[in-house]
Amino acid sequence: MIKIMKMYFGCWLNKDGSKLSDIFSDDVVYSECYGPEYIGIEQIKKWFQDWNEKGTVLQWDIKHCIEQDNTVVVEWYFKCNYEGNVDGFDGVTIAKFDENCKICDLKEFQSKAEHYQPYGK
């Protein structure tokens, strides 16, 4: 299942959505970290195409993975250029897989990449 997550991140890095139907179930529910939700593979394909017309994923590094039963949790760092604005952040994805080893439910959570110690080191 971690291999599938790496394949998905690679789709964004390469601007190649040709494997999305191999990665996601037809009735997938995908919740992005900042609010949008996509229901079904066709909405994910449309979002992927539209986003990549305006943006480029510059980096999507996997930091840590946990796999248990039909669920994968991936901690990552994401950086992109979207409409001329470069931004990056840390995040976590929780992905559940169906019996065909396709993602059927995915939730993303975001954290600021810049951390500080308010009480010193």
Image (tube, rainbow, N blue to C red):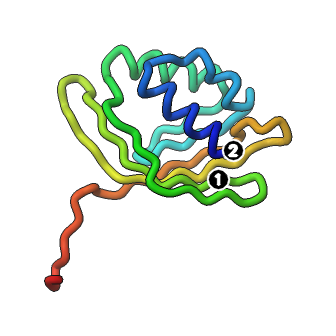
Q: Amino acid at mark 1?
A: Val
Residue 113 in the image: x percent, y percent?
Answer: 27, 55
Calculate the distance from the C-alpha at mark 1 to the C-alpha at mark 2.
7 Å
Residue 33 in the image: x percent, y percent?
Answer: 44, 48
Q: Which mark is residue 4?
A: none
Q: Helix or strand or loop: what does disc 1 sit on?
A: strand
| Quadrant (top left/top right/bottom left/bottom right) for the C terminus | bottom left
Q: Helix or strand or loop: what does disc 2 sit on?
A: loop
Residue farthest along the right direction in this orientation? 99
Tell which circle, 1 or 2, labels the residue nearer the N-terminal end. 2
Q: Which mark is residue 1?
A: 2
- Tell which of 64 and 95 is nearer to you: 64
Left of 116 or right of it: where is 70?
A: right
- Asked whether the beta carbons under mark 1 and mark 2 sit within 8 Å of each other, the answer is yes
Mark 1: few/some/many CA within 10 Å (<14, 14-19, 20+):
many
- In the image, what residue occupies the spot 56% across and 49% down? 107
Vertical arrangement, residue 18 with respect to residue 34, above or below:
above
Left of 46 or right of it: where is 56?
A: left
| Quadrant (top left/top right/bottom left/bottom right) for the N terminus | top right
Vertical arrangement, residue 47 with respect to residue 102, above or below:
above
Q: Which mark is residue 72?
A: 1
Q: Amino acid at mark 2?
A: Met
Quarter location, residue 24: top right
Residue 19 in the image: x percent, y percent?
Answer: 62, 20
- In the image, what residue occupies the spot 30% across and 39% down? 79
Left of 35 or right of it: where is 6?
A: right
- In the image, what residue occupies the spot 34% across and 36% down? 59
Residue 109 in the image: x percent, y percent?
Answer: 46, 54
